[in-house]
Amino acid sequence: MTRILGISAFYHDSAAALVVDGRIVAAAQEERFTRRKHDWDFPARAVEYCLAEAGLAPGDLDHVAFYEKPLRKFDRLLETYLAFAPAGFRSFLLAMPLWLRGKLHIPRELDRGLQGRYRGRYLFLDHHESHAAAAFFPSPFDQAAILTLDGVGEWATGAFGVGDRNRVELIGEMRFPHSLGLLYSAFTYFCGFRVNSGEHKLMGLAPYGQPRFRDVILDKLVDLKDDGSFRLDLSYFNYCRGLTMTSRKMDDLFGGPPRRPEAEITDREKDLAASIQAVTEEVILRCARYVAQVTRMRDCVLGGGVALNCVANGRLLREGPFERIWIQPAAGDAGGALGAALFVWHQLLGHPRGADGSRDFQAGSLLGPRFSEEDIRRVLDVAGTTYRRYPSEDELLDAVAASLAEGKIVGHFHGRMEFGPRALGNRSILADPRRSEMKDRLNEQVKYRESFRPFAPAVLREKAGRLFKLPRKADSPYMLLVAPVATGKRVTRLPAVTHVDGSARVQTVDERHDRFRRLLERFHKKTRCPVLLNTSFNVRGEPIVCTPADALRCFLGTGMDVLVLEDFILFKDQQSQVLRRQAEAGPESFEAD
């Protein structure tokens, strides 16, 4: 038996993943345990969970792999500071203590995180090698082109290559400071959203605007080539030498300074979002065409944070050169932990994969912790809640489907937590997509977020082609593709999940989604609608819930009507005592796990 732990840490979205004899046993982001969104520290709780899932201790591990090479990253930082000196001196002073205390001493930090009980050597992969491995090895393809795009790793900001059976080979890259991820993040910053957190908001805002700045961006900021490579005019950006993403020259170009966070969103921000989204899609399409030409592959896998741009993914599938694409659900840095572990198993140790093109090896990305009836009952009893435990799944599904059909908002907590940024039914908030008022109600009373943010439809896989314009045989089990809503269905059928441009971020639901599929089938039987609105079980600014206590807190603090915790159901209108107690004693009053 070979046990391999992969770790990503010390930038953002730290995570751990455990692979045993080639099978992904567990994977989770640290933020879910610490409740610090995008937690960057050593993933101690995630490591603890992964090992516990397999009944292992750190001393039982055969290999530990880290997702990048810190010394090469430090080399890039030093060269950048020297190249822009003395302009970057303030940024240099802020960064150096973090590097000298910890980031330059990753083996020491790993030893500390594993309590000094791991006795083997640490393996360090290239950042984009980890992305490539995370994209290809769990994919259903025996051979495929690989395209990875993100902010920056060590030096690379994008890479391409080939996956062939049990090996990945990167054959080309784009290098810092020219980066599609950093370009998109610069506009995220300029539009008043948080970098490394708000990029999805910019994508959601884009359909509200017109791409009137597209040509300006391509003329002034980006020198884009036919193969998708480009150079940025760095005089418009500040990330190489300062503490902001853009310079005053960008202010002059776009008629004023960056929007202040929480300030009113104007037509300028909407049009900037539309414009940079259009440029991003053009870059990705050009990259894909070049990669297809060089590799001569019919299929492609995508990794890196830019691969979470589901609008661009949908367009790539519809207009690009590849027959099929597969996207790692945890495409950002968190997925690097999984890629590092799989790279060791397949490429360094030489073990085969057995891909047949039909089903991936990601296990539905349901790789996080699950909780027992005893765990849940203890939390509910400590809190003093009123609940009912259903003796059979049939009765439970009937009750939940009826609540959804009546227009109630349901927090759904079941099975293993999802790995990656998308809730796929196990840590989800669900609602009826046919109700036109549901989008505003969820944004205002449950999620507490901006009104322009859309919601996703989860649809029975076999019904997806009738309601959404997905390419034939296309799957979207990880909610990573945007497709147009079918003409004629938009207004009358699915107003709560149809974005302003008539598109939707689709999740196709099949047997790998377990009880969530059965609930969707029951809702379909009751309403003749094979779709549910699915959004992540959290509120703005917080990670997706992990434990029953997290879920109960979120339920009691929001406008959700019903909470499903495995076989238990709670109705908000029956919780007057616990709500009063919570108001008096604080939200931690029912913590039991």
Image (tube, rainbow, N blue to C red):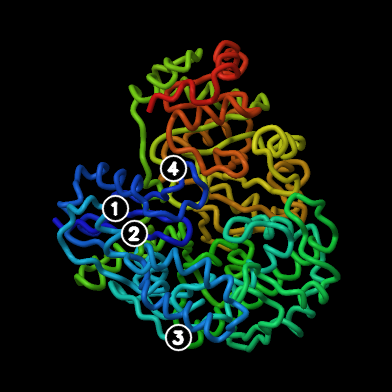
**Secondary structure under the numbered disc 3 in the rendered image:** strand
**Secondary structure under the numbered disc 2 in the rendered image:** strand
Instruction: Residue under label 3, please give it.
Output: 172
Going by the numbered disc 3, the residue's amino acid type is: Gly
Going by the numbered disc 2, the residue's amino acid type is: Ile
The Cα–Cα distance between marks 4 and 2, rounded to whole angstroms, is 16 Å
- Quadrant position of residue 431: top right
Instruction: Residue under label 2, please give it.
Output: 7
Quadrant that contains the N terminus: bottom left
Q: Position of residue 176 (x, y in %)?
A: 53, 80
Q: Position of residue 418 (x, y in %)?
A: 44, 46
Up-down relation of residue 460 to residue 470 (above or below): above
User: Mark 3 or mark 4, which has the lower sequence index?
Assistant: 4
The Cα–Cα distance between marks 2 and 1, rounded to whole angstroms, is 11 Å
User: Mark 1 or mark 4, which has the lower sequence index?
Assistant: 4
User: Mark 1 or mark 3, which has the lower sequence index?
Assistant: 1
- Front in this rendered view, residue 498 or 198: 198
Instruction: Residue under label 1, please give it.
Output: 113
Instruction: Residue under label 4, please give it.
Output: 34
User: Mark 4 or mark 2, which has the lower sequence index?
Assistant: 2
At label 1, counting other C-alpha atoms closer than 10 Å, the crowd grade (few under 14, some 14-19, many 20 or more) is: some
Up-down relation of residue 428 to residue 226 (above or below): above
The Cα–Cα distance between marks 1 and 3, rounded to whole angstroms, is 35 Å
Residue at image point 23% right, 59% down: 4
User: Closer to the camera: disc 2 or disc 3?
Assistant: 2
